[in-house]
Image (cartoon, helix red, strand yellow):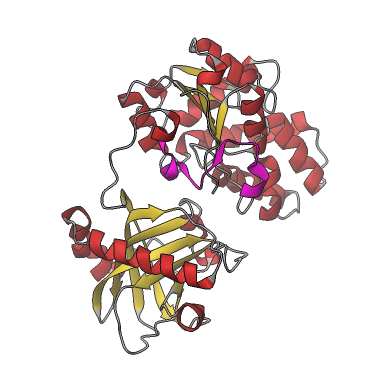
């Protein structure tokens, strides 16, 4: 992630995008479009999904029709797909850090607007399922309320106007390249939070590029800082995954000298898609051995240039033997840092060891230590696993 470019003035207002920035809209779109394509004897290609990011509904429809060779006009396609999508809008999950950021801005009296290429009615539906969101915005601007959508600056300029704010005093937070382009064209400061994996390099026009909303540092823009970081860690709403331990590729043990694990994205796709890449920590339960402290990475591991998003936990314990076949259960309770690349293997190993030290210390704090007693870690089969049929690859030694 890049460091902020120097700013000449402190910001006073914040303007947020919605889809892909605050909400995990992509998961709903793919869930609805996939069966539509099947009915038309087509197969959804997740590698093409990035073409829809930042588009207006009409533009997105045109992209789908062209990519899959469907025999419909954009109007016909939207008339068929919109009713199904509308039923799902209120069920879209917030992206990590979204609710935290909105609460922080509102509680500190920072005027905040929502500016999206989606029609105003869709915006209202999408945020209706999130308590307190609508009240957090001083203004809401939809793509149907301006002459041109992003990458035109119209939406952001209108948002600033409704807040009585000078554009140069506004900070835009966006996930798409059209949104970043629009924000800069409006004369505003822009934080990019790319929703497209491994595409951060394309967002060089932004003032800063970050990994997720968990990594927003308001104080760098003259806004009140978060006060919820504890011992270099950020408490999060816990999430849980499990699977049997199987023999892995040995990268963690052989190359890093660290017994890491790998949870393939295809086995955890629904869970992993909800969580931003980065380094997390928590507790790991092994069915016949007990419960141990754990630190783990989620993402593409830039140093190794992974082609898929993986989950790799490292149990902070020397076992002295392999334990393939045992069930591994994970309770993830905190966040340490964003995913990053490193100039050398040595620097990567040093950072992983530091992550381990941070997790080791933090997990002794009562707010994290209490989760060691979670029934999930001791009786997954009774409570139900987040990923019932998944398998974990663990290089245990």
Image point 30% across, 62% down: which residue?
Answer: 359
Image point 46% across, 24% down: which residue?
Answer: 10
Image point 40% across, 65% down: which residue?
Answer: 296
Q: Is residue 289 above or below residue 359?
A: below
Q: Position of residue 276 (x, y in %)?
A: 47, 51
Quadrant of res 128: top left
Q: Is residue 89 above or below residue 2?
A: above
Q: Which portion, as a residue range, is magenta? A: 200-217
Q: Quadrant of the C terminus?
A: bottom left
Q: Position of residue 186 (x, y in %)?
A: 63, 21
Of residue 257 and residue 179, the one placed in the foreground of this image is 257
Position of 335 with respect to 24 (left or right) is left
Quadrant of res 100: top left
Of residue 375 and residue 176, the one placed in the foreground of this image is 176
Count of numbered tags: 0
Of residue 166 and residue 116, the one placed in the foreground of this image is 166
Position of 338 with respect to 367 (left or right) is right
Of residue 358 and residue 9, the one placed in the foreground of this image is 9
Would residue 104 be counted in the magenta stretch?
no
Q: Residue furthest bottom?
A: 321
Residue 54 at least partly seen:
yes
Residue 96 at least partly seen:
no
Q: Position of residue 277 (x, y in %)?
A: 49, 55
Position of 281 with respect to 250 (left or right) is left
Q: Position of residue 256 (x, y in %)?
A: 47, 77
Image point 67% across, 48% down: which residue?
Answer: 49
């Amino acid at each position: 992630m890049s460091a902020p470019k120097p700013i000449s003035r402190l910001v006073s207002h914040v303007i947020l995008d919605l889809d892909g920035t605050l909400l995990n809209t992509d998961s709903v779109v793919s869930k609805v479009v996939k069966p539509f394509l099947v009915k038309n004897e087509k197969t959804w290609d997740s590698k093409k999904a990035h073409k829809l990011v930042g588009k207006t509904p009409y533009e997105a429809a045109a992209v789908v029709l062209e990519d899959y060779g469907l025999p419909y006009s954009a109007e016909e396609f939207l008339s068929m797909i919109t009713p199904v999508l509308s039923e799902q809008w209120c069920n879209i999950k917030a992206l990590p850090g979204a609710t935290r950021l909105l609460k922080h801005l509102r509680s500190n009296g920072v005027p905040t607007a929502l500016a999206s290429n989606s029609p105003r009615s869709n915006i209202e539906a999408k945020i209706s399922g999130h308590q307190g969101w609508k009240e957090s915005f001083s203004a809401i601007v939809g793509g149907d309320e301006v002459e041109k959508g992003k990458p035109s600056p119209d939406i952001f300029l209108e948002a600033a106007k409704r807040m009585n704010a000078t554009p140069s005093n506004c900070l835009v937070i966006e996930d798409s390249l059209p949104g970043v382009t629009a924000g800069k064209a409006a004369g505003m400061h822009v934080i990019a939070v790319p929703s497209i994996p491994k595409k951060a390099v394309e967002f060089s026009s932004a003032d800063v590029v970050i990994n997720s909303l968990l990594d927003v540092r308001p104080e760098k823009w003259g806004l009140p800082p978060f006060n919820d970081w504890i011992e270099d860690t950020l408490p999060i709403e816990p999430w849980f995954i499990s699977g049997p331990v199987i023999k892995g590729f040995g990268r963690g043990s052989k190359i890093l000298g660290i017994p890491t694990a790998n949870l393939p994205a295809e086995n955890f796709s629904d869970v992993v898609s909800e969580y931003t890449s980065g380094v997390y920590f928590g507790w790991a339960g092994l069915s016949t051995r007990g419960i141990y402290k754990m630190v783990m990475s989620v993402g593409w591991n830039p140093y190794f240039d992974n082609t898929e998003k993986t989950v790799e936990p490292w149990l902070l314990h020397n076992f002295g033997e392999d334990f393939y076949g045992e069930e591994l259960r994970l309770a993830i309770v905190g966040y340490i840092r964003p995913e990053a690349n490193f100039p050398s293997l040595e620097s990567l190993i040093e950072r992983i060891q530091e992550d381990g030290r941070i997790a080791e210390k933090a997990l002794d704090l009562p707010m994290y230590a209490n989760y060691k007693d979670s029934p999930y870690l001791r009786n997954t089969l009774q409570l139900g696993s987040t990923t019932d049929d998944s398998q974990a690859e663990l290089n245990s030694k």
